Structure formats: C-alpha cells, structure tokens
Image (cartoon, rainbow, N blue to C red):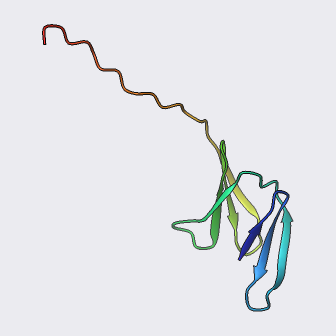
Amino acid sequence: MLAATEMALHKIDLTSRGLAQSVPFEGSGVKWVCHPTLPECFIGFREMAAHLLRWKDLDEVEVHTYSSLEHSAPTIPNRRGR
C-alpha cells in the first residue's frame, strides 16, 4: 500500500503491517493512480507533470511534463441572411 505525504512516499507491507520503504518525494498536490496497463507501476499527476514510479522500489521511471491549456467555447461563424 502507498502512503503519500507532502515530503515522502511510504510503502506499507500489508502482511506485516510495517513500513517496507520510504523515499523522499515532494508530493504536494499529487493525485495517485495505478497504471492502467503496467501493473508494476503507478502514476502521480500534478498540474504540469505526470510521474511514473515502480511499486517494487518506488523508483521514478519517467516524468512527462505538459502545459495547461485553457479551454474556450468554439466560435460560431456569423451566418448572414438566416
């Protein structure tokens, strides 16, 4: 099980109910999900980046950055005569 704080990630062993591993990770505002096609990984989404980590060692495998696009309503051309 993953326990995330603002400064670290903690992997909890559910069998022993003990702390299996901790790694530093600035996790403020991150939303965590299991990877949909790679069961050995999980993803943390931030406002401007997605972090791919491995369950076995909590190693960060990849970071993908993206820009926040503002969505606007589509413009409808002026149709004269209708």
Where's the N terminus, which quadrant?
bottom right
User: Which residue appears at 70% of the width and 68% of the height?
Assistant: 54
Q: In this view, does 17 lie above or below 82?
A: below
- Residue 76 is situated, as x and y percent measured from the top left of the image, at 29, 20
The furthest residue to the front: 82
- Could you say where residue 41 lies in the image, as x and y percent from the top left? 64, 68
Residue 40 x, y percent position in the rendering:
63, 73
Work out whether residue 22 or residue 54 is closer to the camera in this orientation and state it: 22
Q: Which quadrant would residue 34 be assigned to in this image? A: bottom right
When the figure is inspected, residue 62 is found, relative to residue 48, above or below; the finding is: below
Residue 36 or residue 12, whichever sits in front = 12
Total numbered circles: 0
**Residue furthest toward the left?**
82
Instruction: Please identify the quadrant where the C terminus is shown.
Output: top left
Residue drawn 40% across the image and 27% down it: 73
Residue at image position (76%, 70%) is 3
Query: Residue 60's quadrant in the figure?
Result: bottom right
Q: Which residue lies furthest to the top in this view?
A: 81
* Residue 12 vertical position relative to residue 43 in the rendered view, above or below: below
Question: Where residue 28 sits: x, y (%)?
Answer: 77, 52
